[in-house]
Amino acid sequence: MRFALLRNPSRSSRRTLLFLLAFAPFAVIALPLSLSAQENRGGEIVANLATGRVVFCVTHDAIIVAATSGGGEVGSRPPAVLLVSSGRIGVLLGAIDWTAPDTAKTTRFDSELPAVAANALRRPTQKPAQEPSEIEDIGVGMLELIRPVVDQIHHKLELAPDEPLVELILADYVLDYGPEIWNLQYHVRQENLANDFWQTRILRPAYVQLFPPEKGQPRTFIEADYPANIPQLRLAERVTQPDPQFERIAHSSRDVSEAVAFIAAGNSTKAPSSPISDFMRAAIPLAGGNDQNLTMAVLDMNRGFQWVLAPQEPIPPGKTQPTEPDAPSLRKRGPRPQ
């Protein structure tokens, strides 16, 4: 199975910031570890993928995220939606479940990420003048979580040059700035040391800003998919084109109709979150999403993180539980002035 880069219909308008150390083009590599059920060659570590579709919508009062499975082999997991830290929501895609067969030890990135983020955000206060953002701090913490697992891969992988092994999407509100969504992409580099024994290294993440868009670009649904070859839901297009099925959902109530009209006009940040959440809940299965494992959550400006549709299989707790007694409240944060 091939891994693919998360893509978005409006990707040409993104601001892409690459914080890659010693990055250079690397060869197409093969990944014979797409499923834990696959034959484990030579007793090496194997991975289970989180595949499917993710849809974000930044509304007037919240950031909504929905995720559904798709595009993976039997045994693949849906994208993992989770509360990463106080006031920050995340989605993990790609190789996020790892098992060392000799010990049956399993590492789940979704279980460990909240503690990793908490530790990253409480690091030494002495920082250089160009202080890294919290997104960068979490990105480096995630890198340190991935590195020991990737170091155990000694067979040739199969990834295209621009395909990440793991993707982490983070959404939050920033004081005096407003809502933001970032896609952190973790690529690998391999070197054949001898006799088809490969050294595998994880590279520092690439940071791709998904929201806010470039000035003048529409603010609408933001879609991501993993792998990239699965059909997109195209919600942003569907709400602007004649479609009796979608029109029936969009006009199910006056509130939904008015909110969807803001989306169609490219003004999602003027729409209230509740009717948009209702629309997404009905429209995503109609557009091709799997309604059997649809997960939805809201990061509300006033009430913080809330489940709309909790995952069928809750994420188990990690080794350590993060505590953030001094974490800022979303009540102190507001949307960026329009």
Image: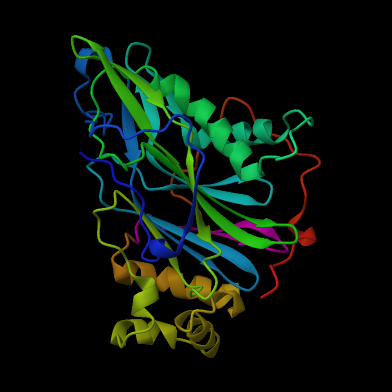
Say how the picture is coloured: rainbow
In the foreground, 315 or 323 = 323
Q: Where is residue 30 in the image (x, y as percent from the top left)?
A: 21, 31
Vertical side of 322 occupied by 276: above or below: below
In the foreground, 82 or 26 = 26
Residue drawn at 69 percent across, 68 percent down: 336
Q: Position of residue 137 (x, y in %)?
A: 63, 37
Q: Position of residue 309 (x, y in %)?
A: 49, 59
Residue drawn at 59 percent across, 74 percent down: 269
Residue drawn at 51 percent across, 70 percent down: 277
Which quarter of the picture shows residue 192? Answer: top left
Does residue 316 appear anywhere in the picture? no
Q: In which quarter of the image is the N terminus?
A: top left
Does residue 159 appear anywhere in the picture? yes
Residue 306 colored magenta?
A: yes
Vertical side of 327 occupied by 102: above or below: above
Q: In which quarter of the image is the C terminus?
A: bottom right
Vertical side of 215 occupied by 308: above or below: above
Span highlighted in magenta in the image: 291-307
Residue drawn at 61 percent across, 44 percent down: 135
In the foreground, 328 or 205 = 205
Q: Please tell me how many numbered marks the rendered image carries.
A: 0
Q: Position of residue 256 (x, y in %)?
A: 51, 83
- Whether residue 221 sits left or right of residue 87 in the image: it is left
